[in-house]
Amino acid sequence: MLKKNMADKQMDTLKKVFCYIKKYRGYLILSVFLAALTVISTLYIPILIGDAIDFIIDAGKVDFKGLMPRLVEMVIVILITAIAQWIMNVCNNKMTYRIVRDVRRDAFNKIEILPLKYMDEHSYGEVVSRVIADVDQFADGLLMGFTQLFTGVITILGTLFFMLSVNVKITLVVVLITPVSFLVAGFIAKKTFSMFQLQSKTRGEQTALIDEMIGNQKVVQAFGREKEVLEQFDEVNERLEKCSLRAIFFSSITNPSTRFVNSLVYTGVGITGAISAINGRLSVGQLSCFLSYANQYTKPFNEISGVITELQNAIACAGRIFELIEEEPQIPEKENAVVLEQVDGTVDLKHVSFSYEADKKLIQDFNLSAKPGQRIAIVGPTGCGKTTLINLLMRFYDVNSGSIKVMNEDIRNVTRKSLRASYGMVLQETWLKTGTIRENIIMGKPNATEEEILAAAKASHAHNFIKRLPQGYDTMITEDGGNLSQGQKQLLCITRVMLCLPPMLILDEATSSIDTRTEAKIQNAFATMMKGRTSFIVAHRLSTIKEADVILVMKDGNIIEQGNHKQLLAQNGFYAKLYNSQFSR
Amino acid sequence: MKKVLTYLTNYKKECVFAPLFKMLEASFELLVPLVMASVIDIGIANGDKQYVIQRCIVLIFLGIIGLTCSITAQYFAAKAAVGFATGLRHALFSHIQSLSFTEMDTIGTSTLITRMTSDINQAQNGVNMFLRLFLRSPFIVLGAMVMAFTIDAKAALVFVITIPLLSLVVFGIMKISMPLYKKVQEKLDAVLGITRENLTGARVIRAFNKEEAEIESFGTYNEALTNAQLFVGKISALMNPLTYIIINIATVVLIYVGAIRVDTGHISQGEVVALVNYMSQILVELIKLANLIITLTKATACMNRIADVLTVSSSMEFVEAKETEQKKEKKGETEFAVEFKEVGLTYKGAAAEALSDISFAVKKGQTIGIIGGTGSGKSSLVNLIPRFYDATRGIVKINGKNVKEYTKEEIRDKVGMVLQKAVLFQGTIRENLKWGKEDATEEEMWEALEISQSKEFVEKKEGQLEALVEQGGKNLSGGQRQRLTIARALMKKPEILVLDDSASALDFATDAALRKAIRGMKEKPTLFIVTQRASSILYADQIIVLEDGEVAGIGTHQELLRNCETYQEIYYSQYEEEERCDA
């Protein structure tokens, strides 16, 4: 049962691979044609050699007149073969690398439309391993398959034909022995597929660990955990060693085994051929030609069996890539999805319930109605669901029940693009892409003019530090923004939003890493920016939210208090306690 | 390259046996045409069927020996290659662990990941193929030539000309394509980089509707990679046809020369067949070799990339354990836990100093607040205490001893550091806490959780200490993550605890409770608090105010409020109104 499933899975993957190949069938046809050409001419040469040898009988009995034309013919055939071979190789290269490019592109495109849930649940390293390592292995296998499978199969057919034309009996000997090598190869391939799968999986696991530990190298060092992390790494590494060794060794048995079968074939041809020659039914030249065919004929079996093991590995890898490509994407937009225009900033949340995991309730029956231009501040102890609320507003996650409406339109009926373009978002976790400062600032407005960029940077007080960087606005930000401080990164994120000025704002601890003096200055800019814009503000510094129109005090996914600063203080409840705590020792 | 290959030294036995057995197999293979020639020249010529059958049994016997040798060789080759890759991965990983922050800042994560994965895989492949074939192929090629000489020296001269010509082609193509393969791997780095970035920055990319732009720029990188692969592929594709031409033309010449030699009665017809057989054996071998060469070229390019990382040495040297033992700390000699003397720090590649002329001294058990504008050097300053970076000027001392005189373990043990970015690792909460102390008891863990104000939410978690933390702590809120990272640092019971803006996601009540709990600890650590909040350090023994990498003022809250302008600005930006209200 399990075996059958595995075979099905393999077939399934193969079918998908063929879908990708289809696009390049022009190259495929050309490649097969050229393969046939090379094979025929390769096989024709032994005949010429055999003929030539028959002209060389004994001392003084060499027919040079008959010999020369054969030799000239040989040279011509050789040249044709070589050229055809080269073009074929180039075709195969093109096909392989383009197919692989397509696969990689599709995998990446999928990443862009996967629900965020997928990314939150899978380790980055594992996904990266699929897009890089697995695709790499797949390419290797595919290239080998193309170059050797066609020529292999055609060589077998061609030699059979040629051999039949020379002598039927000896051909039969060859045909009867060779299937043995397929049996052997097939047996080994079956055994090794699951080993390759395990190898691929273990590699993914290891990449995930590498990604996590090298990505957070600084923490590892701060805790002096190098030794322990290395131990953890070694554990996976040893497992990988074991399963790699098994996969590689067992798959490498194929080649010697089939070669052994081939030597049997060669011997068989030798014995029957020699006896036929003794009986006078075969010339020595023909026997030489036959022996060379026996070699030619069996060689592709060797190669094919080699290719089969390589393909096993490739298919195992391809399977993992297709798993990613076929992952359920986020719910597609409705055909008649509304494009939000001139958003006034009305946002209504009605009876919203949401949780990441079905059995752990988080937000329940949440109601909120934000009027245009209102400032909504959300406060509460950590873990109360503030960030989740932002995930819902931006539709990174869909609500489980209830609805969120913008301008009375359920956001599930709105294009994601127009919804997200209506929000300006600054998160506590600053993320910058590799590129220059300028490229990062203009993310939301690629056609911004230099003046606009400067104005935004000045408003966010990022200009001061940017101009002090070695190349100013064209300074490259290294991976993960390593060369900037946390606060500077946050300033850039704010500049990014200041530049595109969307009608609604989400500020999740937007200024948590910025010093309060700068913050105070930015606050002024924020205040101007927030005028006429509905804003959702999550902050711990209560000073920054005092002026909010509505303050929601959340605890455990529920709103426990609601009102403005004065009202809430007067209530003397949770908010008042929170507020006063900042003056306590 | 050499450095990389040293990881094969543990597999000397395998490295000798694998090619040796391959060679044995090859020598038996070389005997085959000889046996066949005798079948033709003796068996057929004399019409001796008995002899033919005898010889054929010999052939089968040779086949069996060949099979045994070959499988043995494959095993040794696989073992050596896999072992080599495993050792190399271990070495590279541990080398990366030893790099200091300066190197990590410059190299970048994604290229390190490709080198640890893709490059090592290619290297493993290369070693495996190399061991299997490198002796075999030249052996067969040269062996065929030697055998040809035993038949007829004049005819064998054809071999003597052909073989150097072949090596010229093979090594020429190898030399041209090697740097090209290196480029391919570099392009692969870029593809990996953008893939990673799109996973880590998914929220921002989507918030800015940049999916299409990202797809487009991925397309560019992907295309660049494909083009690089195609270009090098085109050159490698020459290998087969070129070798094919050379060998077959050589065969033509061989037949012609053979014809003359037979005509003059020097050799027999059967011997010409054997000569042609040897030539075609070379062809078969070279086709195999061509594939090997491509793999090998790739592998060499990859090994060089690995070697590049291995040769990057840490710019920071730590003293060995022995040396420090001799200069054991004399206890009580100094009352200062941390001293900075005219410290300056310039980051690698930076134009200006990030810190200049910092001097201060902290007594044991004191609480120090560090406050200042964004980019004023707060994090840089505290990063010098556990020696994440070396001061480029001046001296940093812990317990009266220069930080450079401690071993890495000692100093990282003394200083508990909670970084700005709250990072947790995949595993359970317990496993994460163990980072601070491997053999921690249950009570110790709960104690640390209680001090870090995490007890409450951990208790609510299903499984409590066994609750799972996802990669990067994605399933916890920012504040929960921060508190757990603090708990992790507390597990060490450090002499010096540095909180680098690590309470920013905590509300004021929790923040205050946290500070109170730390002060109440039995072995009270010297505490450094880097913060934006004046309230967090109001009651600190000393407050260091930084501005543009320089000290703008040091003192208590009261003192600074009187005489430090920068501090006043910071303070009043947060408290102005309250003061008025309270008054």
Image: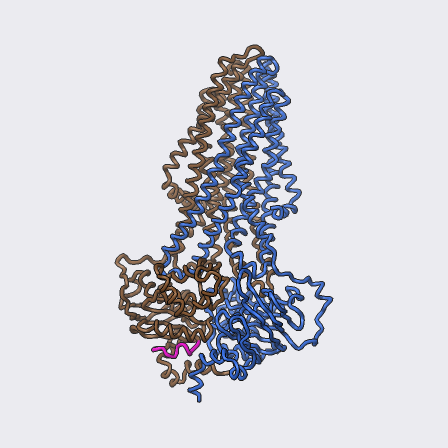
- Looking at the image, the residue that sits furthest to the top is A60
- Residue B360's quadrant in the figure? bottom right
Residue A306 in the image: x percent, y percent? 51, 37
The answer to whether one can see residue B166 in this image is yes
- Which residue is nearer to you in this view: B549 or B469? B549
| B309 displayed left or right of A376 | right
Identify the residue shown where x is 37% and y is 69%: A506
Residue B444 in the image: x percent, y percent? 59, 72
| Chain displayed in blue | B
| Chain displayed in brown | A
Tell me how the rendering is colored.
by chain
- Residue B279's quadrant in the figure? top right
- Which residue is nearer to you in this view: B249 or A56? B249
Residue A201 in the image: x percent, y percent? 50, 51
Name the main secondary structure of what is drawn in magenta: loop
Is residue A184 highlighted in magenta? no
- Looking at the image, the residue that sits furthest to the right is B326
In the rendered image, the vertical position of residue B169 relative to residue B13, given as above or below:
above
Read off the magenta span.
Answer: A541-549
